[in-house]
Amino acid sequence: MAEPQNDPLLQPLPDGIVPAVEVARTEKRWLIAMVSLLIIMMAVVVFSGAMGAIHPPSNVERIDPTTLHLKGEFVESNLGTAQERDGSLTARLVAEQYAWVPECVKLAVDTPVKFRLTSTDVVHGFLLPTTNVNTMAVPGYVAEVRTRFTRPGIYRMPCNEYCGNGHHGMWARVLVVPKQQFPTLALTERTSCVQQ
Ligand code: CUA
């Protein structure tokens, strides 16, 4: 007579129920697969960071984050909204702990808009609720997002990527004005939300 098995997991099972040994074997295989995937993903992160091969979600355009305020497209005087020859608008913002510069941009409704963003320090997130705008501002890269606002109003813009202790307070605004109103504004009023 066979030894009685005390371990309930090793008892013979009714038809259709997978024995514990088989379950353990399957779980071990899945565990190996999951751990391997984690190792591969971590290796990709470390490799792309070390080799400067990060691909931000929008496009790959590199910029030196240490000289943003000194020269080039993101100097202070060039931030905010600019009107292009074809009538479209470009809004340039710099993200830094813990503010967007400028804190508010003014844009026109029903007009092609291009956001160009970058960061001076860490990764920040740029999200405009109820629009298709949602990207990261990665130091060393320029993020570009295109959109068109269908309604005038104030769009509040939270930083959407945890960037440090002050992350929750990192808000900015996009002020969308009627299309006819935009050209009547003085240049200083068009490029920022500062009240004259
Ligand atoms: Cu900037 Cu979160």
Image (cartoon, rainbow, N blue to C red):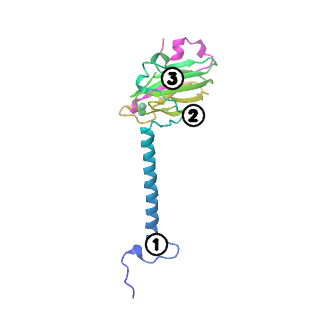
Disc 3 packing (10 Å; few <14; some 14–19; many ≥20): many
Instruction: Find the distance from the CA under tag 3 to the CA under tag 2.
Output: 17 Å
Instruction: Find the distance from the CA under tag 1 to the CA under tag 3.
Output: 62 Å
Residue 167 at what x, y percent from top left? Answer: 39, 32
**Residue 176 seen by the camera:** no
- Indicate the secondary structure of the residue bearing disc 3: strand
Disc 2 packing (10 Å; few <14; some 14–19; many ≥20): few
The residue indicated by pointer 2 is 132
Side of 125 where 88 appears, left or right: right
Query: Residue at point 59% right, 29% down?
Result: 147
Instruction: Find the distance from the CA under tag 1 to the CA under tag 2.
Output: 50 Å
The residue indicated by pointer 1 is 19
Asked if marks 3 and 2 touch (Cβ < 8 Å), the reply is no
Nearer to the camera, 100 or 94: 94
Whether residue 178 appears in magenta in the rendering, the answer is: yes
Above or below residue 192? Residue 147 is: below
**Residue 16 seen by the camera:** yes
Above or below residue 40? Residue 24 is: below
**What span is colored magenta in the figure?**
167-191
Nearer to the camera, 194 or 32: 32
Amino acid type indicated by mark 1: Pro
Amino acid type indicated by mark 3: Arg
Specify the label residue 92 is tagged with.
3
